[in-house]
Image: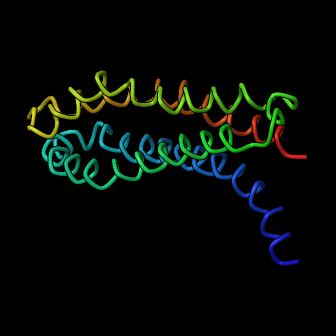
Amino acid sequence: MASTVVSEGLPTILHLVPVISSTCSLWFAWDQYEFMTLFRKPDLQDLSNKLLPSYFASFFNRGAPGVVGLLTTTLFSCGAILRYSPGTTLHDNGAFPWYAAGILFAIGHQTFIPFFLPHVRAIEKDAKEKNVAELSSWLRVHTRRSLTVDLAAWVCCIVATVKALP
């Protein structure tokens, strides 16, 4: 009896993993935006220009593994669902293209690296009075990425899960 419960519950849990990981990715992106915009307050810009190099180095060293972990979780869980779902179940209920799109959008997150990395490097190397301007540029790229591929991956994972679960 216990093995039946586990074997019946595992697919539901597996289908929820990409929803959870993509939700966490989106939430983390929102938090980054909220916390980083504080450095742009006009009355803090002089101090922000001084603090941003050390803050950014710590911020990315600590935050990047979490972001990579969440994206990897989304990729592998969607991939596992596509690979191990029985027969044509995902095609029959229309979930297959949504899981595939979730994978593509999660990968799409990485395509923004060349657009934001120069701003990160400039701040880490201390662009002096331009650190806040570099942060503003990074935030523009970050916002575009969050509102396109991160949001799209989240929507795809939710739709796929809703279609896949009975």
* Residue 33, x across and y down, in percent: 43, 40
Q: Nearer the viewer, residue 106 or 24?
A: 106
Quadrant location of the N terminus in the rendered image: bottom right
Residue 137 in which image quadrant? top left
Identify the residue shown where x is 17% and y is 46%.
47
Identify the residue shown where x is 82% and y is 40%.
164
Reply above or below: 56 against 120: below
Farthest-out residue, front:
87
Q: Is 106 on the left or on the right of 132, as rendered? A: right
Count of number-bearing discs: 0
* Residue 160, x across and y down, in percent: 75, 36
Reply above or below: 76 against 136: below
Picture colour scheme: rainbow
Residue 36 in which image quadrant? top left
Q: Nearer the viewer, residue 9 or 105?
A: 9
Identify the residue shown where x is 17% and y is 36%.
123
Q: Is 44 on the left or on the right of 140, as rendered? A: left
Farthest-out residue, right:
166
Q: Nearer the viewer, residue 48 or 19?
A: 19
Reply above or below: 22 against 91: below
* Residue 14, x across and y down, in percent: 69, 53
* Residue 72, x across and y down, in percent: 47, 45
Residue 119 in which image quadrant? top left
Farthest-out residue, bottom:
2
Identify the residue shown where x is 22% and y is 39%.
45
Q: Is 32 on the left or on the right of 91, as rendered? A: left
